[in-house]
Image (cartoon, coloured by chain):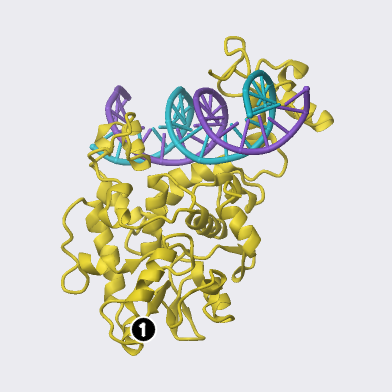
Chain colours: A yellow, B purple, C cyan
Amino acid sequence: MGRAPCCDKNSVKKGPWSPEEDAKLKSYIDQHGTGGNWIALPPKIGLKRCGKSCRLRWLNYLRPNLKHGGFSQEEDNIILSLYISIGSRWSIIAAQLPGRTDNDIKNYWNTKLKKKLFGKQRKNLRGKSQKQGSRKGRDQMNSSMDSNNNINTNPSWSEFPILQQIPYSNDEPRYSNDHTSIRMLLMKLGGKFYDDDDDDKPMNGALNPQYDPMDNSLMHPLYHNSINLMSSAPMGVMNTMNSPFTNSHEYNVEGKAVCWVDTDTEKQKLRERMGSDTSVVLALNDGCNSTAELEHMVYTDTQKLDDLEMLYEDMLNNKPSTTLGGNLDWEDMNNLVFPFPPLVVSNNEGHQHGTLLEEGALNELRYPRDQ
DNA sequence: AATAGCTGCAACCGCGGGCGT
DNA sequence: GACGCCCGCGGTTGCAGCTAT
């Protein structure tokens, strides 16, 4: 049985709101509030609008203290961090950004932020989709499925073999393939932003790595807080997951948290557990026979990490990887684990003072519908 | 200058969940 | 427990303005 319509679609006005309509709605709500019933509101005001439309107009445009446009770097970072942690839960993300609406953030993500993140790749996509009409070109960035739920033949995030190999745990929230895949790719790229004007140059002040004088390594702002906090407790965030690992080592290089465990059994454990949200970005076991070797690799040989990025570009171009060479092949890729980073929310003073959300809030954000 | 293609944003749509009866 | 209603959410669409050719 279908749901009854919330209003008579033939008698309600649709499309852009006029200043008069805005004034009526704002004036009424300023004086009387919403009354807790949007459906009943339009007749009271004399508006020929659907209640849902009134609600949307109020929440997204008329509500006081709303900010429009001009997202700051700080807001970018928060959006990215939360997107990586919880996916496309725009309302939750909006709750962390005063004055921003979920619609605003959703639009900003779809139109700008995603391009900032994958600016380098967008260049590669140019000419493939954009000659096929504006809507089609745009939709190919947003969806990998056609109307019959068939996977499109054009390459999309969800079709990369490496992404399909990453397992889900049973209690993990299900996200759409596209969002999940994009999040995974963000893990691999370390959330690196590229400026539209110079695709090869990480954006100044964004998520590019920063030098950390404390340990002579390159710190990644996105993880800076979490690394600091992790260092204040053994095993850091992994501890909050009741880590079963008896011998593990965490490093930070080029903004990527690297975790190494000693045995195949533990590696397997890591893969099983880290399939869901965790703090460790990249576990890189193979190619190192000891922690000392790993340490050397982490701090002096970033070639493997660079290879990941090159591999990603090849995948986007839908061609067999030519960049793996002897450094990293598909077997190596099978030994990489890319779980999610910690949930970090910074305040206005910058990333130095970010805080990890408390465990309860973290779970609420991650599994609100499972509880 | 014309126009095809692209972008950004506002608004719409349908669905799931919560709540009252 | 079943049902109806409304809210809130995420995905999608429409369209005006901009840009490239």
> Considering depth in this image, is A337 or A295 the residue closer to the camera?
A337
**Vertical comparison of B20 with A102: above or below:** above
Q: In front here: A236 or A40?
A: A236
Image-quadrant location for residue A199: bottom left
The chain containing the residue under callout 1 comes to A
Q: Residue furthest top?
A: A10
**x and y, in percent, of residue A360 in the image:** 65, 60
Q: Position of residue A45 (x, y in %)?
A: 76, 19
Vertical relation: A161 (above or below) A150: below
Q: Residue furthest bottom?
A: A292
Q: Amino acid at mark 1?
A: Tyr
Drawn side of residue A106 relative to residue A251, left or right: right
Q: Residues within 10 Å of mark 1 (few under 14, many from 20)?
A: some
Q: Quadrant of residue A285?
A: bottom left
The answer, for residue A128, to whether it is visible in the render is yes
Q: Residue furthest right?
A: A31
The spot of residue A317 in percent (x, y) is 22, 51
